[in-house]
């Protein structure tokens, strides 16, 4: 996996738009998720592991894992849309491949097929340990719909 700092960055305007949109999400704030990388058609989110996002065995809860995957894909799609467009998830499927453990989780959303109306993204979530080792803990696919931004 490439270091996000070495990957292509979206334009400053797109990065600001995505970050501002992300900052308005109550759930991501509640979970403690952060944006780690915004590139054209690709967004990385990081979720620090802490007791508030774990389940009864100490692993990150599937709901938190799925939520950051969904948001990473949505923001990946948003990087390719014009300023008048927003995005909503139509559906997603996630496979939980291993217990979500580590120092933090990294969710990566990547646009597979952009469209005028529907966009399809790949979702990956890695458990990242303090020594830098990474393990794929979830993967999935998502369909998003482009909608007009609501009037302010």
Image: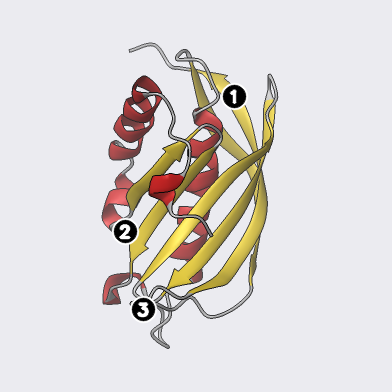
Circle 3 sits on which residue? 131
Q: Which residue is mark 1?
A: 146
Query: Along the line of sight, which residue is nearer the eye, 148 or 11?
Result: 11
Estimate the x, y position of residue 8 in percent, counting from the top left.
Answer: 48, 36
From the top left corner, tell me how far across and down residue 49 is, in percent: 33, 71
- Rendered position, 107 above or below 72: below
- Between disc 3 and disc 1, the foreground one is 3
| Residue at the spot of label 2 | 31
Circles 2, 1 touching at the beta carbon (< 8 Å): no
Q: Which of 9/23 is in front? A: 9
Mark drawn on residue 100: none
Residue at the spot x=53%, y=80% of the render?
99
Residue farthest along the front direction in this orientation: 6
Label 3 sits on a secondary structure element that is: loop
Quarter of the picture holding the C terminus: top left
Q: CA distance from mark 3 to mark 1?
A: 39 Å
Q: Residues within 10 Å of mark 2 (few under 14, many from 20)?
A: some
Q: Residues within 10 Å of mark 1 (few under 14, many from 20)?
A: many
Q: Residue 122 versus residue 131: which sits nearer the camera?
A: 131
> Is the residue under label 3 in contact with that under label 2 (CB below 8 Å)?
no
Residue at coordinates 45% horizontally, 49% vertically from top-left? 44
The colour scheme used here is secondary structure
The answer to whether the residue labelled 3 contacts the one labelled 1, judged by CB atoms less than 8 Å apart, is: no
Disc 2 on helix, strand or loop?
helix
């Amino acid at each position: 996996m490439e270091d996000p700092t070495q990957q292509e960055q979206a334009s400053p305007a797109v990065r600001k738009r995505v970050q501002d949109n992300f900052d308005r999400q109550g759930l991501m704030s509640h979970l403690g998720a952060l944006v780690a990388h915004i590139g054209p058609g690709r967004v990385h989110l990081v979720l620090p592991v802490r007791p508030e996002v774990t389940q009864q065995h100490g692993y990150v809860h599937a709901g938190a894992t799925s939520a950051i995957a969904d948001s990473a894909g949505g923001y990946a799609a948003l990087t390719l849309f014009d300023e008048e467009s927003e995005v909503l998830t139509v559906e997603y499927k996630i496979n939980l491949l291993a217990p979500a453990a580590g120092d933090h989780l990294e969710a990566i959303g990547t646009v597979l097929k952009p469209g005028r109306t529907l966009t399809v993204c790949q979702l990956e979530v890695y458990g990242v340990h303090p020594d830098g080792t990474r393990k794929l803990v979830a993967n999935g696919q998502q369909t998003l719909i482009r909608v007009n931004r609501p009037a302010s």
